[in-house]
Amino acid sequence: MKKFALLALAGVASAAISTSAVFAADFKIGLSNGWVGSEWRTQMIDEAQAAAAAWSDRGHNVQVVVQSANVDVPGQIAHVRNFISEGVDAIIINPNSPTAFDPVFAQAKEAGILVISTDAEVSSPDAIYIGIDQTAWGAAGAEWLAEALGGEGKVVAINGVAGHPANEMRVAGYRSVFEQHPGIEVVNEVNANWDQAQGQQAMQNILATNPDINGVWVQDGMAAGAWRSIMDAGKADQIAATGEIRKDFIDLWTSENLNSGATVNPPGVMASALNVAVFMLEGRELKEPATAGQYGNAMYLPIPFISSENLAEAAAQVEGQPGHYSYTSVLSIDDAEALFE
Amino acid sequence: MVDAVAQPPRNPGSIKRFIERYPFLPALVIMLVLLALNGLWQPRSVGLVGLTGLAKTYLALMLLAVAQTYVIYAGDIDLSVGAIVSLVNVVIVAFMSAMGGDTITVLAAMVIGLGVGLACGIVNGVVVAVFRLQAIVATFATSIFFTGLALWVMPVAGTPAPATFWRAYGGRILEVPFVFWAVVVLAIMLYLIARTRLAIQLLAVGDDVQGAYQSGLPVTAIRMRGYALCGLFAALAAFCITGDTASGDPLVGGKMTLFSVAAVVLGGSALAGGHGTVVGSVFGALIIGLINSLVYFVGTPSEWQNLVQGLAILIALVAGILIGRRARS
């Protein structure tokens, strides 16, 4: 009797082990972030961690391990080497350099690790990129601005860090759009290093030298600074300028009824990449392989846009959040699954 | 019996002399402790693959810390070393991709790279030693200038380095990883430079500029040579970065500058000059690398990683000072 019970127990146990092996795959995913200078990055990590936790509803145990600190390029290469030492299944990285990771990603792939970059494209053939197309991001804001000005007027651009790949792609994006509008004249382009205070300063200088401008194309957090200078100069009703996606600015936009439009670079990109990664780790095949972009390894996510028409919706999403919280969008597990065979 | 005679007598005075003779010892102890802790939490990180990775990743910082040490010897500082790394990186990558990636081109590129590093060092030497500008501000200004040059050579990161270059860096010679050979060559170079008159002259200038001048040393020329040596080692660091990243990036070295200064101080050299060792700076660079890994391996939550890293570096600094002071008192 005792023997029978033991046998039965063993049978149940082995059945349990085999079902868990079939249905509840355990994955360990390493997240690397090499710059912590903005709340956007913190939100990016938080959303990715939430996305991993959400997989438990599907019976998956997705564990994330995070390395997030201000590091130089070698420091972030060390992140990747640490993940390889630890034996993770996948690495999702917001890379500090587009090209510097080729050798170390090759090592990761040799170790059987899936490598995905997000937010910034990488040249490595051993990785794929899941995120937005920064060129299209730059173009979308420029198209809104050209339309807001009726295709006529003097425009200035306030850019991020010269030589930074995302910045160069965004610049290429707006230039290609403005070239198609002969009535739009770009009278000045300056760099304000993605810094709100420098953006405000740059805008003051521009207003002093070009008081007759009609439009401003400006990126991310610098937009809040630029708008502050525009409002201080009392020109908010004469100038159209692109905006940004943090709650503070969305509130200002709503209350002051600004003539603005914001292209969204959602902090949820890393969460989206994670949802795609889990399906890839399961061995599912993408319907359309990631072959877009200059490096032929990109899969672009849709880019949301906030204009005065859908401003109320955006304000509702960020309602109750702290002022630095960014409007976001994530490829849900179901959306991600739809991309696979 | 012979051994007992050869051993120094065990009294505090001898340890004191020992530490004074080898000021890098506290850094060595801290490094070994960190290595052991890394192995405790992640055994694979101290295996052959893990250690090769550590050397590959931090060889550039080791060389840059050595570069920084030579100017700090003389009481100066170079805040442009990171920018020199970026500039040399883009120059050699641009040259190699324009000329094709054969062995002759690679060697020519390295000669050019050393020339660029040397030129940058001489520029720094001229503004600091000849024009007598404050080193910290003058080299900060030249760092912006060098970054501007790098951006002019290569406006966007992306040009790949030829495969011969980075395969050599990541490869093996006689079954031993290339980087370990590089470390051996570095050790020999440091030993030889330490025996030159220049190393002693730099320390003399850092110890007491007035005294050095009055005793007839050509202070201006010595400080300039320190910066020139610094530029050369920064170029070597750039070769390592290029080998490990296989590409050109005009901003790649920018953040390494302050890490190089931190490595020098962790290694037991005095920022005021006149006292220190290059070997200590090499250990200092490894301490920074090992701390970064350890912070992750012990499972620090992401929002605390920067804070813990900073604290750990501070603790390593304090520990080094305490070990040194207790041994000396």
Image: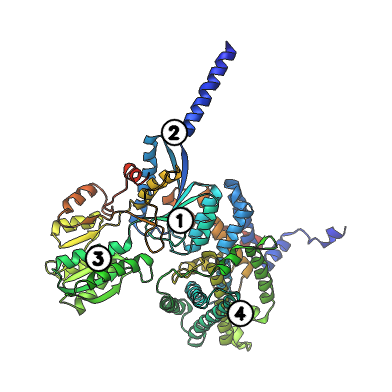
Residue under numbered circle 2: A23
Q: Amino acid at mark 4?
A: Leu
Query: Which tag, 1 or 3, sits closer to the chain's start?
Result: 1
Separation of residues labelled 4 and 2 (CA atoms) = 68 Å
In front: label 4 or label 2 = 2
Q: Is residue A278 visible?
A: yes
**Does label 2 or label 3 sit earlier along the sequence?**
2
**Which mark is nearer the camera, 3 or 4?**
3
In this orientation, which residue lies closer to the viewer: A9 or B72?
A9
User: Crowding at label 1, few (<14), some or many (≥20) Cα neighbours within 10 Å?
Assistant: many
Q: Amino acid at mark 2?
A: Phe
Marker disc for residue A127: 1
Closer to us: mark 4 or mark 1? 1
Is label 4 in a helix, a strand or a loop? helix
Marks 3 and 4 share the same chain: no
> At which x and y percent is residue A86?
54, 48
Q: Quadrant of residue A138?
A: bottom left
Q: Quadrant of residue A203?
A: bottom left
Q: Determine the CA span between mark 1 and mark 3.
A: 36 Å
Marks 4 and 1, how far apart at CA: 48 Å
Camera-near label (1 vs 3) is 1
Q: Quadrant of residue B25?
A: bottom right
Q: Which residue is mark 3?
A: A225
Chain where mark 4 sits: B
Give the Cα separation between the discs numbered 1 and 2.
Answer: 27 Å
In the figure, A141 relative to B197: above or below? above
For this view, does A115 lie left or right of residue A254? right
What residue do we see at 50% from left, 55% from top?
A80
Q: CA distance from mark 2 to mark 3?
A: 51 Å
Q: Position of residue A83 (x, y in %)?
A: 51, 51
